[in-house]
Amino acid sequence: MISKVGAILWKDILSEYRTKEMLGSMVVFSLLVSVIFNFAFPPGSELMREAAPGILWMTIIFASLLGLNRSFVYEVDKGCLQGLMLAPVDRNVIYLSKALVNFIFITLVEVLVLPVFSIFFDLNVINSLLQIFLVLILSTAGVAIIGTLFSAISVNTRSREIMLPIMYFPVFIPVIFGAVQSTKAILQEQPWSVIWGWLRIVIAFDVIFLIVALLTFEFVIEE
Amino acid sequence: METANPSSADVQAGALERNFAAIEIKNLTKTFGNLYALKEVNLSLETGEFLTIFGPNGAGKTTLIRILSTITKATSGEIVIGGIALKKTPEQIRRQIGVIAHQTFLYDDLTAEENLRFYGKLYDVKNLNAKIAEIISEVGLELRRNDRVRTFSRGMQQRLSIARAMIHEPQFLFLDEPYTGLDQHASEMLTGWLKRVRGSQRTVLMVTHDLERGLEMADQVAILNRGKIVFHERRAAIDPKHFRNRYYEQVARESN
Amino acid sequence: MKATTSTNRAVVLLGGALLVAMIINLYLIFMLAPEERSMGQVQRIFYFHVPSAWVAFLAFFVVFIASIFYLWKKDRTYDMVAYSSAEIGVIFATLVLITGPIWARPVWNTWWEWTPRLTLFLVLWFIYLAYLMLRSFVEGEERAARFAAVFGIVGFLDVPLVYVSIRLWRDIHPSPVIAGGEGSGLHPDMKLAFFFSLFTFTLLFGFLLIYRFQLQKSTIAVSEIKKQLAY
């Protein structure tokens, strides 16, 4: 099974590496959004710094929506998904591979955007880098877990671009809270117990919905 | 779940031994909401036989292929392939079937070799490197093995698609209008390949609306129209000269 | 189709019981229950607001269970139950969102407060909406049912997580709590009115669910007949 996950993973990474379509647009989009948000606040204000974690995460989420949509669009439009389904591959394996690909790409975007963001918003990220990475990894896992499941659904709907956010945003609220509030707590150098209070929610979200996704993905992908 | 499954030789031996039809389709029905895509289709193929199904657009040909290749589930009916019931254990059947359609299932941005390697891994093909080399030269694409599929012509893509479908040496082949969009040269190549396949004891089901080519290879011939089999004969019983008229007649009759 | 006469009878009986319950309920709410000290007459909305919330949750729970059964058994009946329940649930969730501000405005002079309950219901409302939109945006009934079932399961399991995160958020930024007029020291007559209201609303939910379900069933029966005729 691992080899098949690896095979699909490698295939997607290779394709993306050759075209650079998805990563490129996600990075550009994130940078653009950060700048625009910047303009919405009086320059250098306390308000901006307070809102920074929220803006950071909204930027990441909007950018991931771009990436999530694309992960299945290609397969469906070219019929390659059928090629996958023809093969003796567990439907769960397809899910895991796609979720991993999304996770990797979104994390990559975050790694590129975070430094720029901390410069724009004058945030001291270096001190608590490890903690911030923990938040990033856990929250991005949530994005990938739910996002992959939902994009497999939305890609089969009319107006697929709008259906994904409509499904995704309300369900994703616990992680939005968790990510934003724990980032804020980290930047404000609050005690670990506070941060952990929020991260717990994100972890619970990840675990519960990973299980649900593994159980229900085959129902989504069958025709 | 992927359980240990019989090797292709076992499947074949099993089919011959128990005197099973290699493919048995009983009362297959598929509905999409209010519409019948397929209605009580009955077909049966012995090992090594070649069945061509003709039919106009919308007859249900593609739906039939999709059900046989385990992508879509039937609404009702029984299908047994190589002694294995489709409904119960589709995963075992997937190892034994190869599908060639007008879609190639190939990834444009990967090279020919990368595409084959990918599918080879999915099918757990042993000695993958050797197999890739072998099959890529069989379809005459050794010189282009490191080129991206995006740069291939339609005929070349179809050839690579054949390699993709055959890399795991399936016992059953399903072809969904494989001649679509192929030029003369590519079509001849495809026909040549199909002739070689016929000699290899593989069981083949092809849907097409190319009357000539479809008849050339067939052991059995059927016509599917609006989801129903309206004609089913052994090839030997058909006079190709008159078949064209019969085909249009059958199709027109059902439309009224 | 054979069960319809007995189910019809059940529906009529239930409808009758419901009517009686509603009349009694209105009496209890407006006649028997005393006026609340601090908030006045407007507090009576509480007897509609909280039971509506209860029903919205109940409806969502029904969607959850029916969705699981649908995926498991592939029986269309479960899907119809889920769909009916979702439609009703969204109506009651909307009621919560309307009665909330109506209550809040005279009490605190503001239309909206991000209280845990109201915020949760806003999110729940959006999840319901997404569920219903999903059903209409997908081609193919069977597919729509499957997708909706998966989303229904995910949505329901998400609700406790949403609630926990909202509560934690509000712990940091507390807001006035409507609950001041609720569980704390309710007059026995108020308790009676409240619990009876709960009962009546549950009855209402059951009635609407069965009614909507029957309606769906007839619609599908008609299209089945159409299907046969077309062939």
Image (tube, rainbow, N blue to C red):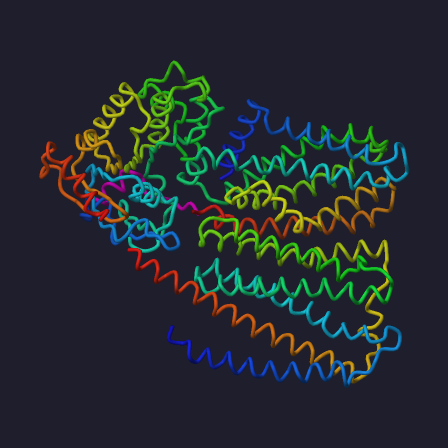
Which one is in front, A99 or A60?
A60
Identify the residue at image location x=73%, y=33%.
A33
The answer to whether residue B39 is above or below residue B181 is below
Relative placement, left or right, of B128 versus A47 is left
Question: Which residue is painted at 69% across and 72% down in the image?
Answer: C51
Asked if A1 appears above or below C219 in the picture, the reply is: above
Percent of width and height locating residue B114: 46, 24
Viewer-proximal residue, A159 or A57? A159
As displayed, is residue B110 above or below residue A50? above
Most extreme residue toward the front, as rendered?
Answer: B256
Magenta stretch: includes residue B5: yes
Residue C60, percent from left and from top: 61, 63
Q: Is residue A137 magenta?
A: no
- Would residue C141 appear left or right of A10 to someone viewing this image? left
Q: Is residue B234 left or right of residue B187?
A: left
Q: Residue furthest top?
A: B143
| Quadrant that contains the N terminus of chain C | bottom left
The range drawn in magenta is: B1-15
Please name whichever residue, C226 or B8, is drawn nearer the observer in this view of the structure.
C226
**Where is the C terminus of chain C found, in terms of image quarters?**
bottom left
The one of C138 and A176 positioned closer to us in this rendering: C138
Report the residue at 55% width, 64% height from top. Answer: C65
Give the image location of residue A215, x and y in percent.
53, 52
Residue at image x 79%, y 45%?
A182
Q: Would you identify the image quadrant in which residue B241 lies?
A: top left
Would residue B129 appear left or right of C23 to someone viewing this image?
Answer: left
x%, y% of residue A10?
53, 29
